[in-house]
Image: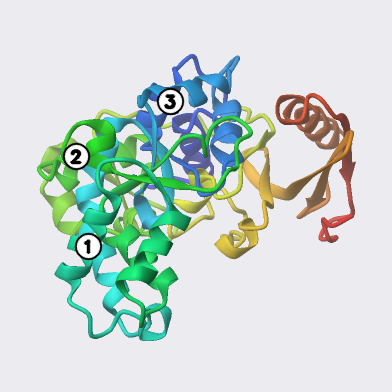
Amino acid sequence: MKLSNRVLNRTLLARQHLLERSALTVPEMCDHLIGLQAQDVPPPFIGLWSRIADFDPMTVSDGLDDRSLVRITLMRGTIHLVTPSDALRIAPHIQPELEKVPFRKGFNYGAMVGLDPDEVRERGEAVLGDEPMSAAEMRARAAELYPDRDAGAVLQTWLYQLPVLQTPPRGKWKDNSRPVWSRVQPWLGAPLEPGYALAELLVRYLRAFGPATTMDMQTWSKFTGIKQAVDSLGDRVRTYTDERGRTLYDVADAELADPDLPAPVRLLGWYDNAVLSHQDRTRIVPDGDAPPLRAFATAVAPVLIDGYLAGLYKIFPKATVARLRISPTRAWSAAERREVEAEAHALLEFLEGDREPRVEIVEPGADLRP
């Protein structure tokens, strides 16, 4: 069965809870999405606000405090907001590749080449111990232990080698303080769980992002062995083809969305996985050329109209005013403009409710900077 781009778009939006806001709790949404991108503090809050009805941001802060939510390096080597169970069972798929990075010649111009990885790891475990520690403190200890090496490179090596997570207060509502790190086991009171099958994780990916090709799954995860894992699922998955004849996999009991369903305007957070989790992004980006990660690093984020990326926005809070500036990627109708303005004002009320809101829509393709 061949699936149109429109079916893939509406199915992705439905599975991402972007067609209508959900009654799921924050942990339930994190589990369903297999985490939310959390390299910066605001994006997971924006992602949850876009997906959950009556979302209360304090539920994230409380979850980080009571350890029912954690911020940890997972897919693609980036920080995700996840539940403890996912932190413990997904991290073992990540760690082997992370641990190789620091001892390659290209890492910090070969800063760690020549050192024994096992010795470096053991020293890092001793330094970090069982209590959270700031990066500054870890860097100071690195300088003492390796006076002839770059202390920052040693610190980065420890953060790659040791299964670690970021502890509060960073990541709480409106708290952008510097990271404080803890080893996973003492923070969560449990060891990593290496027995979680990659195939099971891919079933969950398909429930949140499918139907998808094996290359889409690899783009999302950066894992190896994707094709073998999918083949092992047997009749738990079914296949389709897309408009270009490529094989798409999906969970056998998953439903496809009606391509005629209306899709409301959504303003996502930068790095949102809905945009970045497929090799072929044409199901959500009209020309398939999603803005690269480096563009999102400056807090520039996507505007979805009729389910597709149709603009980029950035918020400029200053003193008593919060300006949300939007640069369309195409011409908008008057009705689309009104719907974008309404959603932008709602987002400003959520994020910057104590400032005067100003929504400014510039000409298509114009610079977002004021």
Q: What element carries label 3?
A: helix
Say which quadrant the C terminus sits in: bottom right
Q: Which mark is residue 123?
A: 1
**Disc 3 target residue:** 65
Q: Is residue 110 left or right of residue 277?
A: left
Say which quadrant the N terminus sits in: top left
Q: Are marks 3 and 1 in contact (CB under 8 Å)?
A: no
Q: Where is residue 88 in the image (x, y as percent from the top left)?
A: 23, 39
Residue at 61% in and 34% down = 46
Q: Is mark 2 on a helix, strand or loop?
A: helix
Q: Distance between the residues labelled 1 and 2?
A: 35 Å
Q: Is residue 343 left or right of residue 8?
A: right
Image quarter of residue 368: bottom right
Would you place residue 266 above or below residue 247 in this image?
A: above
Q: Position of residue 104 (x, y in %)?
A: 29, 80
Residue at 38% in and 64% down = 155
Q: Which of these two is toward me, 62 or 292?
A: 62
Q: How far apart are marks 3 and 1 (CA)?
A: 28 Å
Residue at 47% in and 21% down = 62
Amino acid type for the residue under numbered disc 2: Glu
Residue at 54% in and 42% down = 6
Mark 2 vs mark 3: in front: 3
**Disc 2 target residue:** 200
Q: Where is residue 293 in the image (x, y as percent from the top left)?
A: 56, 61
Crowd band around label 2 with a 10 angstrom C-alpha radius: few (<14), some (14–19), many (20+) = few
Q: Residue 184 carries which label?
A: none
Q: Which of these two is toward me, 132 or 251?
A: 132
Amino acid type for the residue under numbered disc 3: Asp
Residue 238 visible: no
Q: What element carries label 1?
A: helix
